[in-house]
Amino acid sequence: MKKKVLFGLLLACFVFSVFCKDESIFRYEVNNGGITITGYHDITGHIGDLEIPEKINGLPVLEIAGGAFHYNVVTSVTIPDSVKIIRPGAFYANRLTKAIIGNSVETIGEDAFRGNLLTSIAIPNSVKSIGKSTFKENKLKNVVVPDSAKVEKNAFDNNVKITLRK
């Protein structure tokens, strides 16, 4: 019996990790001819590796809503070049060890990646604003911030001897 339950759980996790690349698992809203991702349809309670699609139903994904994936178990996320805004708390309190931020992101909201396990992050030159506590409480060691980015108070607090470079 335990083997059947374990097999079922493993199969569900595998199936869900495959579906995380499928646009049908995302909850979203259509705004001004683009998509704002507001969350996902929880199948197993475990996301793992998350790849945000560039388009859903032919429309570009432009934003990730505030709190869209907060308090989950996302371990890595890839955000496409179509996304312009990552709203506050979007990936707050996950288990992120890897985050790839697309080259068109201009705004990363307050607490967006707070409370994760990131050791490094590449912030693209397109970023103009990094909100308060955005990368607070991670394990970041070295971060390069574009000269054009306005960095709010405490954006990188409580990390491992972080070195910020512009």
Image (cartoon, helix red, strand yellow):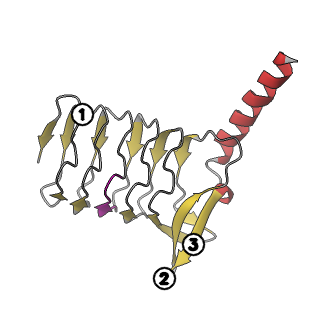
Q: Which residue is mark 1?
A: 159
Q: Secondary structure at mark 1?
A: loop
Left or right of 107? Residue 151 is left
- The kind of residue tagged 1 is Asn
Q: Which mark sits nearer the N-terminus, 2 or 1?
A: 2
Q: Using the numbered discs, state the Cα–Cα distance from disc 2 to disc 1 in whole angstroms.
A: 37 Å
Between the residue at mark 3 and the residue at mark 2, the CA separation in whole angstroms equals: 10 Å
Residue 126 is situated, as x and y percent measured from the top left of the image, at 26, 61
Residue sitting at x 40%, y 43%:
99
> In the image, which is nearer the foreground, mark 3 or mark 2?
3
Q: Secondary structure at mark 2?
A: loop
Amino acid, disc 3? Glu
- Circle on res. 29: 3
Q: Which residues are magenta?
A: 105-111
| Res. 81 image quadrant | bottom left
Depicted 29 relative to depicted 146: above or below? below
Picture quarter with the N terminus: top right
Please tell me the numbered disc located at residue 32. 2
Does residue 154 lie above or below 57 as drawn?
above
Task: Confirm whether the magenta stretch covers residue 70.
Answer: no
